[in-house]
Image (spheres, rainbow, N blue to C red):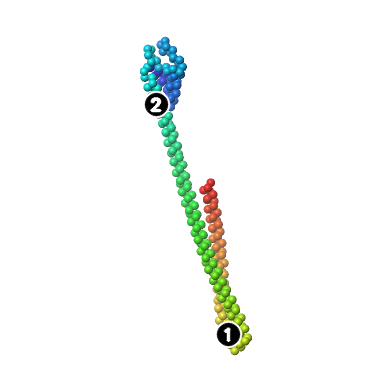
């Protein structure tokens, strides 16, 4: 028994690490020695005393096996903890990056929706002004028709030329006002058309940015 303990300690010191304790049993079993006059061949336990085998050899084997298993499990546990910490760090980084990208996408969507609402409002205003312009054009046509009728009446009724001349002057003034209003509306329409083009260009740029951002998120 004493030889086994000394041999085991020397083997541990030679290997230099407790992680290789599990190989100790194979080293002991494969070792050949001679105790007294009894020869022990390879593959047999070399636990011998001068008179009889030591009764504690199985306990020593179990102890060494337990220590080897415990050391191996501790190493695996440390590796698992390191991997868990690394994965947690990566998850935190990915979560923060996704939050930033999600906020940027929401901001861009809000900008696009606001621009779309502005464009829709401008379209409604233009439609209303177009309807008003059509009404004014209808009024102008009615006035022109009335003028033609009155001109024909002037030829037929010379007696009421002065009265109709006054009416014509009034209608001419109204016509000038209508034409001035029409010019103002045309100027306003041109300005609004220019503004609408700028808004559409901005909307197209925002749509392009949104598509690029969605492409980045998909990759």
Please say if 92 is above or below 46.
Answer: below
Camera-nearest residue between 202 and 47: 47
Farthest residue, direction bottom? 159
Please say if 172 is above or below 27.
Answer: below
Camera-nearest residue between 68 and 195: 68
Rendered location of residue 174, percent (x, y): 55, 78
Rendered location of residue 10, percent (x, y): 42, 20
Please say if 200 is above or below 29.
Answer: below
Which residue carries the number 1 mark?
Answer: 164
Describe the element under mark 2 as helix, strand or loop: helix
Q: Residue at x 48, y 49 (%)?
A: 101
Task: Answer yes or no: is residue 2 visible.
Answer: no
Please say if 13 is above or below 217.
Answer: above
Q: Residue at x 39, y 15 (%)?
A: 48
**Number of numbered discs on residues:** 2
Q: What is the C-alpha distance between the residues marked 1 and 2?
A: 126 Å
Camera-nearest residue between 128 and 179: 128
Q: Answer with the quarter of the image where residue 82 lies.
A: top left
- Mark with earlier residue (1, 2): 2
Describe the element under mark 1 as helix, strand or loop: helix
Rendered location of residue 96, percent (x, y): 45, 46
Farthest residue, direction left? 55
- Please rate how many residues cluster around mark 2, counting C-alpha atoms within 10 Å: few if below 14, some from 14 to 19, many from 20: some
Task: Answer yes or no: is residue 57 visible.
Answer: yes
Q: Quick check: marks 1 and 2 in contact, CB under 8 Å?
A: no
Q: Residue at x 55, y 63 (%)?
A: 196
Which residue carries the number 2 mark?
Answer: 66
**Quarter holding the N terminus?**
top left
Q: Residue at x 59, y 89 (%)?
A: 159
């Amino acid at each position: 028994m004493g030889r086994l303990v000394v041999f085991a300690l020397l083997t541990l010191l030679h290997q230099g690490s407790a992680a290789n304790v599990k190989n100790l049993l194979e080293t002991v079993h494969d070792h050949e020695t001679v105790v007294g006059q009894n020869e022990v061949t390879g593959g047999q336990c070399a636990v011998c005393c001068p008179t009889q085998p030591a009764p504690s050899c199985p306990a020593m084997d179990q102890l060494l096996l337990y220590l080897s298993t415990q050391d191996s499990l501790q190493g695996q546990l440390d590796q698992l903890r390191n991997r868990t910490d690394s994965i947690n760090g990566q998850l935190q980084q990915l979560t923060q990056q996704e939050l930033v990208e999600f906020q940027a996408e929401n901001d861009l969507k809000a900008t696009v929706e606001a621009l779309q609402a502005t464009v829709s409002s401008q379209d409604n205003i233009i439609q209303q002004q177009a309807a008003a312009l059509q009404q004014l054009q209808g009024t102008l046509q009615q006035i022109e028709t009335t003028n033609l009728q009155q001109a024909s009446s002037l030829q037929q009724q010379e007696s009421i030329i002065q009265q109709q001349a006054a009416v014509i002057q009034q209608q001419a003034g109204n016509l000038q006002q209508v034409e001035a209003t029409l010019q103002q509306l045309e100027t306003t329409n041109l300005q609004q058309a220019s503004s609408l083009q700028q808004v559409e260009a901005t909307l197209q740029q925002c749509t392009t940015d949104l598509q690029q951002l969605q492409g980045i998120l998909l990759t």
